[in-house]
Every structure is written in structure tokens, then in C-alpha cells.
Image: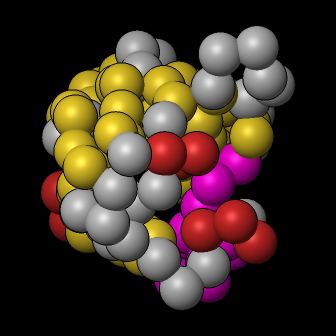
Amino acid sequence: QVQLVESGGGLVQAGGSLRLSCVASGNIFRIIAMGWYRQAPGKERELVARITSDGSTYYADSVKGRFTISRDNAKNTVYLQMNSLKPEDTAVYYCNVRHSSYYGAVYDYWGQGTQVTVSS
């Protein structure tokens, strides 16, 4: 089992910045990728950004140029730096870790979610 603890959400005015952090702990063998999803009220959960073990990144079009994902492999931690925030970025943000066990079984683990609210 892998546990994820998120932090860094909150309330910010449009144009402001927030930094989300997610620490993975537990029975970690190999982390394939770490990422952030978000879910706004009445909408489906969507992938915001992802970073793989070799450092390759993916961003949703809606956040390109404003959000930056990074990771500290030694600390099993992933960060999401969010700049130029817009009201439409308001959502619950979930940390996701794709993990491979020693036997090759791949699982997705999720954090509890952290609220990000951007006021206009």
C-alpha cells in the first residue's frame, strides 16, 4: 500500500499563485508516474499534469504556461506550482501515483484531495 498526503490548497484571488505538494509513503517499490487531477462541481475528474520517472511531463491545454509540475524522487514528492490562477481553476485537486510492485502489478493510488478556490 502507498499512502499520499497532499497539502497547499486554499483560497486565492485571480492572478495569484498556489503550490500543491504530495508526499508518497508506505510500501514503495517503483513509482512510474506522479500527477495531479482536478474535479470541479458537476464535472468529471480531469488530468491536469503528470510527470514520469524519467522527468517527462504532460499538461492539460488549459494550464499550459501557467502550471509547472516537478518531483523530488528522493523524497517521493510531487509539486504543482500554479501561477496566474483563474476562477475556472477552482476545483478539488487530487494527487495520483502510478506504482509498480516488485511483482510488476501496477496500481493507481489517490490522495484525499485538496480544495483550490480562485475568486474573481
Q: Residue at x 64, y 27 (%)?
A: 39
Residue 102 located left or right of residue 120: right
> Relative to 104, does residue 91 appear above or below in the rendering?
above
Instruction: Identify the image quadrant of residue 58.
Output: bottom right
* Rendering coords of residue 66 (x, y %): 47, 77
Q: Residue at x 36, y 33 (%)?
A: 117
Q: Per the image, is 54 magenta?
A: yes
Q: Main secondary structure of the magenta part?
A: strand
Residue 104 spot, x, y in % from top left:
74, 42
Query: Residue 88, percent across and down?
Result: 58, 45
Q: Is residue 90 visible?
A: yes
Q: Is residue 106 magenta?
A: no
Left or right of residue 41, residue 84 in this image = left
| Count of numbered tags | 0
Find residue 35 and report its horizontal and vertical position in percent: 55, 52
Q: Is residue 52 above or below residue 20?
A: below
Residue 11 or 25: which is nearer the viewer? 11
Q: Nearer the viewer, residue 17 or 102?
A: 17
Looking at the picture, the colour scheme in use is: secondary structure
Residue 8 in the figure: left or right of residue 69? left
The residue shown at (74%, 40%) is: 46
| Magenta stretch bounds | 47-59
Q: Is residue 80 above or below residue 3?
A: below
| In this picture, residue 10 sits left or right of residue 101 | left
Residue drawn at point x = 24 percent, y = 62 percent: 16
Q: Is residue 80 visible?
A: no
